[in-house]
Amino acid sequence: PIFVTAPVERCGSTLVQRLLNSSRRIAVYGENPHFCEIAPTALHAIARVVTGEHSGRGLMESAREGERRGATEFWTNSFLPPTTDYAEIMLDAFYRAAAHYEADAAALGFDRWGVKYPLGRLEAMREWLSFLPRTRFVVVHRDIVDCVASAKARRFFTPRSPLMAFCERWVRNMDWLERLRGNEVHVMSYEALLEDPMSEIDRLGRFLDIEGMDPDVMTRKINRFT
């Protein structure tokens, strides 16, 4: 699969998604936070418990033994079914979801599939790659001032979702982006894409081995707010 992401929202990931879909070679689906970030992150957390890297495993085993003995005076929040079995169920569900995406793309006539989602933590790319290691990431970034202006136009910022947290996430993810670059990651600048679309589209196509992206997509703005 192909995963299109960004340090924060309003970086141009939807434009890249539309470009890729215009090739008719790949179906890049819209944003599903559970599949793209929540599930892989949760699976890694469960794995840490299963392997004993997290102290919660001892608490859960103790709680299960307490229930087995009929005790009631212990921390019952840790009373859960066997973690390994639960992890296998969750992992199976994740792979079934991936197969569902792949099958749907094929039914629509696309050879390949992908997803688009601005990750809250770009380091979650590593968690995703541990389950789908052949994934190719496309990360598009944009100047923070323009991101903020665009996000304000969308009325993103509220007391529960403050502007400062948005900016801090941009800084943190841009820092992680420097560490995450590799053969499986293609980094794009939104400004460069606007300035020289043909060159950037060519670079993107060579990275993903995809031809036929329609440059006219660049001339049509469908996600504009004032």
Image (tube, rainbow, N blue to C red):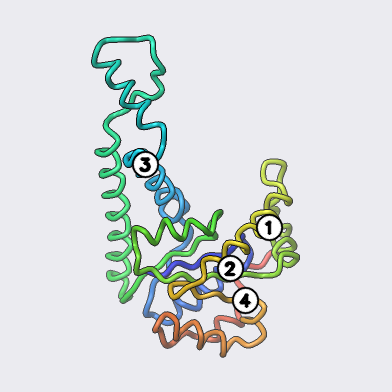
Q: Which mark's residue is nearer the viewer, 3 or 4?
A: 3
Q: Which residue is mark 4?
A: 189
Residue 131, quarter of the rendered image? bottom left
Q: Separation of disc 1 and disc 2 at Cα?
A: 28 Å
Q: Separation of disc 3 and disc 1 at Cα?
A: 36 Å
- Work out whether residue 79 or residue 54 is closer to the camera in this orientation and state it: 54
- Give the amino acid type for the residue marked by disc 1 in the picture: Arg
Measuring from the top left, give residue 174's x and y in whole percent. 62, 64
Secondary structure state at the residue bearing disc 2? helix
Q: Is 140 placed left or right of 110 in the picture?
A: right
Secondary structure state at the residue bearing disc 4? strand
Q: Which residue is mark 1?
A: 154
N-term mark: 3 or 1: 3
- Give the amino acid type for the residue marked by disc 4 in the picture: Ser
Instruction: Determine which of the numbered discs, if any, sits on residue 178 in the image.
Output: 2
Secondary structure state at the residue bearing disc 1? loop
N-term mark: 2 or 3: 3
Q: Is residue 205 visible?
A: yes
Q: Separation of disc 2 and disc 3 at Cα?
A: 28 Å
Instruction: Determine which of the numbered discs, if any, sits on residue 46 in the image.
Output: 3
**Residue positioned 57% across, 66% down in the render:** 177
**Dot 1, crowdedness within 10 Å: few (<14), some or many (≥20)?**
few
- Give the amino acid type for the residue marked by disc 2 in the picture: Glu
**Dot 2, crowdedness within 10 Å: few (<14), some or many (≥20)?**
few
